[in-house]
Amino acid sequence: MTVQVSVVMPAHNAEDYVTAAVQSALGQTLREIEVILVDDASTDSTVPAARLAADGDPRLIVIQCAINGGPSVARNIGIERAKGSWIALLDADDTFAPARLEAMLRLVEASGSDLLADNLSVASGPDVSDGEAALPQKFMSKPGRITAAEFVAWDRPANGLRSVGFMKPLMRTEFLRAHSLLYDPRFRNAEDFHFYVRCLLLGAKLHVTPHAWYQYVYRSDSQSRGLEAQYPEQLIRSNEDLEQFAIDCDDKAALTKLRERGKEIRNWIPYVSFVTLLRHRQMVEALQQFFRLPSWPYALKQLFRAGLRRLS
């Protein structure tokens, strides 16, 4: 069978979610696919649950890692193993709408994209099918090609799930291999954003659609989410790495936006520490942290925005 799309699914201790993920991938209306589940040294029943969900379907390929390397390493293993003309990323706690891959293939054929991204439907569990679209509609409705500078401008740590780095595009395998593109194993935080920006700086054609065919199940204990508190310095390091990459690629517009993003990250990290202290009602420590913040206007602006979100 010719494989049109390889679905790459990193998984770590996802036994409660992986059944829905595997079934949504194997249940696609597009049948010419393979599903590569890379088990990142799980200590639970992720692998047996995935195999049970596949019910003997030979299109499920399971690769088990002896050591936990993080989502970047797991995705690289899947990408290198992929036989499909296209690669689709699927986290083990998320799901695809039944016709997602078929619909996206039609769009990439019409647009000539190297990367094509749909919106994310945010849900609290795999059985929730009607979540709110996460990514900004203004961005996801943009016609034509998205530049590296435009992409960077829409990804800010303070945006949370509305940052476009959370997207899960369909990616042309030929483009990735022509440029030897893999995830940077140094990063467990914002690794997707780092990878996509490198693709764009190397000339990848990115198009988007406002349709939300990817259901994003939010859970704080996922290996690929909620990592800002554990690896905040990686946001700075990865952004600096991309700044140098933009210089090497002579993309001045992207470099400008990356420098703006880097400045915001340096304000955002201490601000998060301040807000965490507030939430734990450690008022003395919070006040001390507030006076150590590099930018009070930035902190006040974020507090005001948070208040508006609560009211709405």
Image: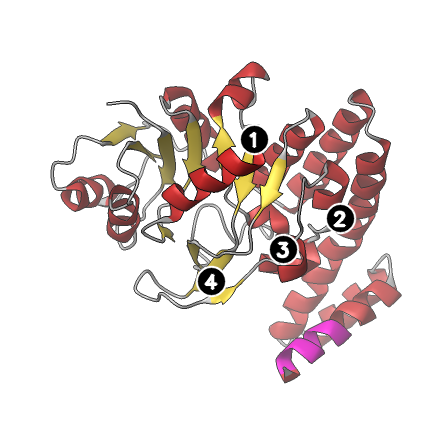
Label 4 sits on residue: 122
Q: What's the amino acid at mark 4? A: Val
Tell me the quarter of the image containing the C terminus.
bottom right
Position of residue 34 measured from the top left corner of the image (x, y, whole percent): 29, 31
Q: What's the amino acid at mark 3? A: Ser
Q: What stretch is highlighted in magenta?
A: 304-310
Label 1 sits on residue: 114
Q: Which of marks 2 and 1 is nearer the N terminus?
A: 1
User: Is residue 11 inside the magenta stretch?
Assistant: no
Give the distance between the C-alpha atoms of the residues marked 4 and 2, in whole angstroms. 22 Å
Q: Which of marks 3 and 1 is nearer the N terminus?
A: 1
Q: What element carries label 1?
A: loop
Quarter-of-image position of residue 115: top right
Q: Earlier in the sequence, mark 1 or mark 4?
A: 1
Give the distance between the C-alpha atoms of the residues marked 2 and 1, in whole angstroms. 20 Å
* Of the two numbered discs 2 and 1 in the rendering, the one whose residue sits closer to the viewer: 1
Label 2 sits on residue: 153
**Camera sees residue 188:** no
* Of the two numbered discs 3 and 4 in the rendering, the one whose residue sits closer to the viewer: 3
Q: Earlier in the sequence, mark 2 or mark 3?
A: 3
Q: Which residue is drawn at 37% across and 42% down?
A: 102
Q: In this view of the protein, which residue sits in the foreground, 95 or 109? A: 109
Label 3 sits on residue: 141
Q: Residue at x 71, y 35 (%)?
A: 237
